[in-house]
Image (tube, rainbow, N blue to C red):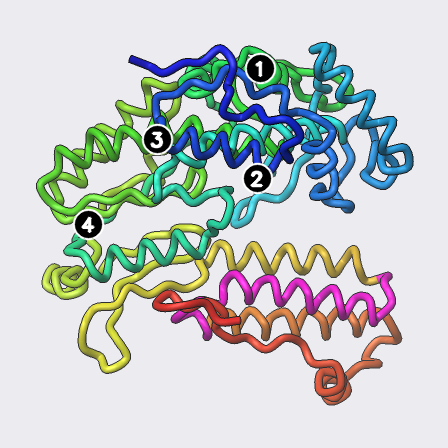
Amino acid sequence: MVARCEETSAVHGSGEPVETKLQRIAEKARKEPGFKFTSLYHLMNEELLRGCFKRLRKDAAAGIDKMTKDMYAENLDANLSDLIGRLHRMAYIPQPVQRTYIPKPGSSKQRPLGIPCFEDKLVQAGLVRIMESVYEQDFMEDSYGFRPLRSCHDALKALSETVENKPVNHIVEADIKGFFDNVNQEWLMKFLAHRIEDKRVQRMVKRFLKAGVADDGSVTVSDEGTPQGGVISPLLANIYLHYSLDLWFEKVYRKSCTGVARLIRYADDFVACFQYKQEAERFREELGERLGKFGLEVEPTKTKVMEFGRFAVQNAKRRGERAETFDFLGFTHYCGTKRDGKGFRMKRVTARKKFSAKLKVFKEWLKKARTLKTKELWEAAKAKLSGHYNYYGVTDNLRRIARFGAEVKKLLFKWLNRRGKRGCLNWQKFNEMLKRFPLPEPRIRVRMFGSSVN
């Protein structure tokens, strides 16, 4: 029997802060996994939306309304009052997202991005706060993407712990073809209704899915997909994959295995670890069938089963081959040994495609930024380099990030030299400049074994 309630009394309380009400929802969701929430939309109030407003980025790109955070703030009280009135009359209609394209790392292709208008970002942020309080109690431990207090590094650590401490001998590297474009909206609404039966929340989510995309003056509305770039899209993606993939793997597939089986997912990027080859191969086959039921397709050229683990290197040598590697979250993972040369260690370096793509992005930025004052350009370059080190500065990857830093220095020297007379800046002068205004040093920021380095 599914628990229901016409009025979610557990979340009503006179004068209680929204934060307290959200905590009550979370507690109820955690204690009663079958409970369906029918009264949540009333939480879309001034307190919630004002809090969401504070958290929105000032420098975010504007949508088709050209509205920025600073502009909206000029008359914030009146704007919020008007917005809440429209929301509760169900008169709020989301606008189409502005289609823009950004370079796809490691490829000549362009990645489409949808930029919602400002109020849509605000309303989506409010819906996310409410829906997250329910779904954070349901999502699997091994789902890491776009969730509070979870990161790519957490997913990588979980992978290290599994491969090194469990009898893992095979990895399935998987890729879902065009995931965000192929989410079936009908299935998504069914999944949402498993936990949220508040019709107004459902209607508002549906309106965002049907808002359409504005591209070159025309608006396209599709029955498939969630526009990338929206604040709500990552949560909707996690809900979709929770029901179509995570639950199936945990409750059905893993229970059919006789050996170790673990799936680690970050958004639509995931790998599965197995003890036995036949169970890895069976997963590869059944994965396609399972995802196919929900309108998703595995990309065959990027999905494979490989031998990987403590015996992979010696087994490959015996066959006259090299042990296989796999990419996950921007890193290439390979089989190595501990420092003393004894014992297995899984190691990782920046994936070649990512390395090249990141350098290309830095070079393109330099081209556009060369008109900045030297001090501004230098500070921005330092921030970009720090960001790279913060992400890629993980155990075993020091040489690769040091090489990235060296390539960035070459690019800076080249472009700073172009600003003045040809040859006005030689390497000696540039090195003196580096001594006076040092760039961040490459170092390991995140330990894959133990705590992070600050």
| 258 or 298, nearer to the observer | 258
Q: Few, some or many C-alpha atoms within 10 Å of disc 1 (few <14, some 14-19, many ≥20)?
A: some
The label number, if any, that marks residue 170 in the structure image: 4
Q: Please give left or right for residue 109 compared with residue 30 in the image.
A: right
State the CA–CA distance, disc 2 to disc 4: 31 Å
**Callout 4, which amino acid?**
His
Q: Is residue 66 left or right of residue 24?
A: right
In the figure, is residue 135 to the left or right of 229?
left
Residue lying at 66% horizontally and 36% vertically, measured from the top left = 101
The residue where tag 2 is placed is: 109
The reply to whether residue 98 is visible in this rendering is: no
Residue on which the image places disc 3: 298
Residue position for label 1 = 206
Front: mark 1 or 3: 1
Spatial distance from mark 1 to mark 4, Cα to Cα?
Answer: 41 Å
Front disc: 3 or 2? 3
Mark 3 element type: loop
Q: Earlier in the sequence, mark 1 or mark 3?
A: 1
- The reply to whether residue 2 is in sight is yes
Highlighted magenta segment, given as a residue range: 371-398
Q: How far, Cα to Cα, is label 1 from label 3?
A: 26 Å
Residue at left offset 66%, top offset 59%: 362
The residues bearing labels 3 and 2 have C-alpha atoms spaced at a distance of 20 Å
Disc 2 is placed on an element classified as loop
**Mark closer to the chain start, 3 or 2:** 2
Q: Dividing the image into 4 quarters, which one contains the N terminus? A: top left
Pick whichever of labels 4 and 3 is earlier in the sequence.
Answer: 4
Amino acid at circle 3: Val
- Position of residue 453 measured from the top left corner of the image (x, y, whole percent): 48, 71
Calculate the distance from the C-alpha at mark 1 to the C-alpha at mark 2. 30 Å
